[in-house]
Amino acid sequence: MEHRGKTVFWVPVAIIMLLFALTTSGCGGDGGSSPKTTPPDPTPIIGISISSTTMNIGETRTLNVTRTNTNDFTLSVSPSTGHGCLKSGSNAVVCTPTVAGTYTVTVTATADATKSASATLTVSPAPVVSISISPTTARIRAGLTVKLTVTPQNTGINWPAASGVAGSFTTSGNEVTWTLPSVAGTYSFTVTAAADTSKKATAQVTVFISS
């Protein structure tokens, strides 16, 4: 009888423990399968850059702007006058300065005004352009030729049109071999500086008929 009493006692205890285990398992069963949240995309890295350059007055230079994760930029230049710099689309700055000096060109990303880059624009005075011809005067006998030497400074040479020169001529480097007419008279040969067509040099040759 003692043995039956012990058995009857453990049966309810086992049932209670089983129910407790099932209840505990049911409450925490979904804990590991909760939905995952996707972290937001990181803030894009914004970058901008521009290169320095040197130039002369009278030239035009394009400064290329490199952008990262920003669709445009704003431009500022110091000093604010004389630089001739303007935006050109969203990837370049075009400068045509009128005053020599050193300028700071700054571009700022429109997507983040804290991101900017600067370049130095160094502008020199326009080079002195000149052109000369030697000899400037000569006197030769009809039927002969004369050799002229042209000296350009900071420029190329614009040779005259053949139709505008009496006789005929050939060039080699900076030298001209001019075959003049056989008719007595004074003839001109004019060269022009390519960089500044207001700069000219003229040689005058007098042809005489020998008696």
Image (cartoon, helix red, strand yellow):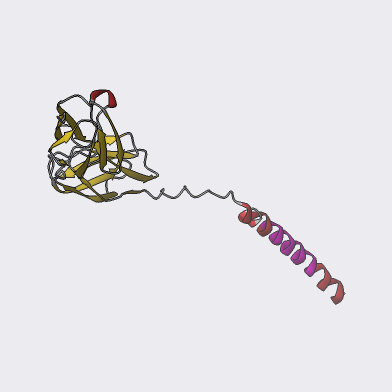
Tell me where residue 99 appears, x and y as whole percent.
12, 42
Question: Main SS of the magenta segment?
Answer: helix
Q: Residue 175 at x, y = what percent?
A: 26, 42
The quarter of the picture where residue 16 lies is: bottom right
Q: Is residue 199 visible?
A: no
Residue shown at 16%/45% (left/top)? 127
Residue 129, position as x, y percentages in the image: 16, 42
Q: Is residue 90 magenta?
A: no
The residue under the point 49% across, 50% down is 39
Residue 4: image quadrant is bottom right
The vertical placement of 127 against 200, above or below, is below
The N terminus sits in image quarter: bottom right
Q: Residue furthest bottom?
A: 2
| In the image, residue 84 above or below residue 181 | below
Q: Is residue 106 left or right of residue 45?
A: left
Q: Is residue 5 above or below residue 168?
A: below
Taking the view exactly as shown, the residue that stands out farthest to the front is 211
Q: Nearer the viewer, residue 109 or 36?
A: 109
Highlighted magenta segment, given as a residue range = 10-23
